[in-house]
Amino acid sequence: MDPYSVLKKVINIKPNFIAIDRTPFTEKKEDLFGIQIVNKKIYPARLPIITFSLNKFINFFKKEYILIERWVAEEQPELSDNYKGFLFKKKY
């Protein structure tokens, strides 16, 4: 399923606020897609993962929401990861 179609369903509900946390982002223009391989000691699995383009993601909300807060997630799975959080407020 397209992650933006899921986000659009959330927007269509018209909540006053949308919070996104611990989500991977890239500075690249396009989103990155990959497969996350879970350590077999935890459980054997291969899961799809998206790393959102930061600008593309924020612009997706701009028509109906204002970005009021952003932060770097406290937990970063890897030192090179760039997990962030955002709080959007509905425009009235």
Image (cartoon, rainbow, N blue to C red):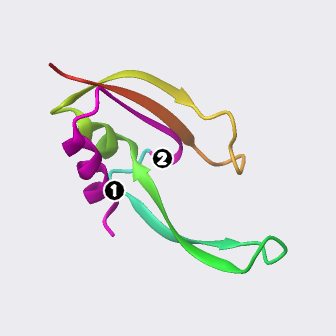
**Residue beneath disc 2:** 25
Front residue of 77 and 12: 12
**Residue beneath disc 1:** 30
Q: Neighbour class for label 2 at 10 Å: few (<14), some, many (≥20)?
A: many
Q: Position of residue 70 (x, y in %)?
A: 46, 25
Q: Tell me if residue 2 comes above or below residue 54 in the rendering.
A: below
Front residue of 71 and 80: 71
Q: Position of residue 89 (x, y in %)?
A: 30, 23
Which image quarter holds the C terminus?
top left
Q: Is residue 5 magenta?
A: yes
Q: Say whether residue 43 is left or right of residue 60.
A: right
* Residue at left offset 70%, top offset 50%: 77
Q: Please, what is the three-letter code of the amino acid marked with disc 2? A: Phe
Q: Position of residue 55 (x, y in %)?
A: 32, 40
Q: Position of residue 31 (x, y in %)?
A: 37, 57
The quadrant holding residue 82 is top right
* Residue at left offset 56%, top offset 73%: 47
Question: Cβ–Cβ below 8 Å for labels 1 and 2?
Answer: no
* Residue at left offset 44%, top offset 67%: 33
Task: Mark 1 or mark 2: name the one nearer the start of the chain.
Answer: 2
Q: Is residue 14 magenta?
A: yes
For the residue labelled by badge 1, is the local secondary structure a helix, a strand or a loop? loop
Front residue of 66 and 56: 66
Q: Which mark is residue 53?
A: none
Q: Which residues are magenta?
A: 1-26
Q: Say whether residue 81 is left or right of residue 58.
A: right
The Cα atoms of the two marked residues, 1 and 2, are separated by 10 Å
* Residue at left offset 66%, top offset 48%: 80
For the residue labelled by badge 2, is the local secondary structure a helix, a strand or a loop? strand
Q: Please, what is the three-letter code of the amino acid marked with disc 1? A: Glu
Q: Say whether residue 35 is left or right of residue 11.
A: right
